[in-house]
Image (cartoon, helix red, strand yellow):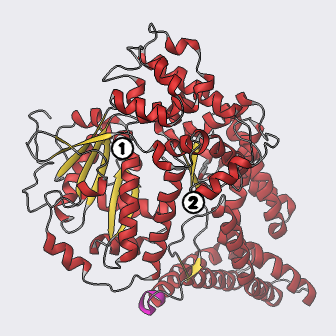
Amino acid sequence: MNNRDQKGFNANDNSNFNIGKVVQNFASPETRNNSETKLLNAVKNEVALRLAQSLHRRVYVELDKTEDPSQVASPWSMDVKLGDSPSQECPEGTHIVTIFDKKEIGGRLLILGAPGSGKTTLLLQLAEELVQRAEANAKAPVPVLLNLSAWKTQYSDIRSWMVVDLKQKYGVRKDIAEDWIETERILPLLDGLDELMSQRQETCVQALNDFLPDWTGTPLVVCSRFEEYQVYESNLGLNGSVIVQPLTDEQIETYLCRAKCDWLWEAICPDRDIMNPETGLARSPLFLSMLVLASDKLPPELWRQDKSAKERRRILFEAYINARLSCPYRGGENYQVGSKKSDRRQSKRKPVRNPYPKDERTKRWLGWFAARSVEDAQTELFIEKLQPYFLKTRPQEFVYGLVYGLVLGLVLGLVLGLVYGLVVGLFVGLVGEKSSNTVETIKISWRSTPRNFYKGIQTYIVYGLVIGLVYGLVIGLVVGLVIGLVIGLVIGLVVGLVLGLIGEEIDTKISDNQGIYQSVTNSIICGIVFIPFGVLILTALHYFHEPMQLSEILAQGAVKGFLLGASAGGLLSAIEHSALRITLWLFGYAPWNYSKFLRYCTDRGFLQRVGGGYRFVHALLRDHFAEHYDPS
């Protein structure tokens, strides 16, 4: 470290860590409530899946014949730095949790390393241990994996960002998240500081330092690349740091020999660029794993020493991609990695027909997916979170608006008449806002506290009546003032009542497209709820405006009431998403069955599946796809 501000590594700063506060915080609950239990299970599954789908694990599954995970154990070594003292090398085999538990660190730790050095894997290994502790002790906080790449300038502080990110990633209701942060019932594990745009990194560091003095009772861990961290104006106010060191010659040789790739060691050993102590590809566990997995496809130009380090990395990525695409496909839709039994079962399955034999098309689809992940500053993407603003050209926007408008017009035509419905639908589709939000967490909140329950109902009923009054005055110009006010107030009352009853509980996604399916389900539920009120409105029209037959009142009232409720409950979100998927397919940006394609890419070793979302096995591979294969 240089002579910059070293407050981030001051182990004697009692303001940063207080054992008494920890004991005080942990002394409250004897058992976890339902929301905390759901969150803990979600984090547990996420950690298990990400570790199981890591490239280190894939080397073990595919190349190691002893069926012993220790044969390809993570090969890196670590140094620990406290305060102004020189960094000290950790003994071989030291677990990250041992450092985390040091009295002078107290769980407030910074993990640093080069790209692909294994920082995130260390963070996941720490999370795995912390999850086990939280399962054994209800007083312990729940570890949560949050990615700082989602930090944006509109966030005023870390606390408000955490609330939003807990909602987006784990489905935690805002008030629950605020309570957990206030009472320090979560243990933040923050990755991806270096993935922020350069101008936002310093702002984020400052926000973290403003937050840390208030976060005095519970540990917090941050993970970042060493090179980017060195240029910040000030260090993070943490008690110590772990620095992941480049692999030594002995570690590289041991790793390759255990992976049954002795010949690869002989090939790279004399290559001074690949074995460069500071910049060599082989010094990184990520690239070393890729060398092993792509060993059959490594081109001769990789060994040419006139190639730059950047060009060699590109060649290695291409070799890895081509090697993975050419592997026999055994069907990955039901493949769950993570245990010896499942690994052996997968290896014994016979190859089946590859559903995506055109490799260039696969790269192009994955390139578009990667570019949107970079553009939206999200490490994890959910199919239902694809947005219309991802479309970049006017023809694409026009086609999306046309498809959305036509479908919406047909739906509205059942209420307004076909002509009026199509006119309104096309206007909304072609001129409306280009964004989409699913209605996926609507649940009747009977388990919320009675005070909050009734307060929510009262608030939304008032809002609904005000909106209904305005609406009634408008339609009163057509059907008459009295009937207009009656219809408006009824609709406002119903909308307010429904919105007051529904609430958001923690609801972690565990399957593809879960948000869209939930939106459709919610639209059906809300549609059924609205049927009686649709009949009521038609009955009012019968008495005050236009006489109708009983059968006509029942039929039209049921249809119009259902469509009104369905639209409020998620039908519009489902239509928007369907229109976007059709547009992406028409322009060749995505396959028709996106879920099947992403599972295929997970099987190939490009993606990791986490719950109902997907993330690339490493940000560097994502950046490679985005740079070289984005068709937009």
Q: Residue 542's x, y, as percent?
A: 83, 87
In the structure shown, which secondary structural element does the residue marked by tag 2 occupy?
loop
In this rendered view, identify the residue nearer to me: 44 or 453: 44
CA distance separating discs 2 and 1? 22 Å
Q: Is residue 146 left or right of residue 95?
A: right
Membership of 53 in magenta stretch:
no
The answer to whether residue 627 is above or below residue 196 is above
Residue on which the image places disc 2: 611
Region in magenta: 449-453
Q: Is residue 468 left or right of residue 286?
A: right
Q: Residue 192's x, y, as percent?
A: 38, 45
In the structure shown, which secondary structural element does the residue marked by tag 1 occupy?
helix
Amino acid identity at mark 1: Lys
**Mark 1 surroundings within 10 Å by alpha-carbon count, few (fewer than 14), some (14 through 19), many (20 or more):** many
Residue at (31% x, 36% y) in the render: 199
Depth check, mark 2 against mark 1: the one in front is 1
* Mark sitting on residue 119: 1
Residue at (92% x, 87% y) in the render: 551
In this rendered view, identify the residue nearer to me: 245 or 508: 245
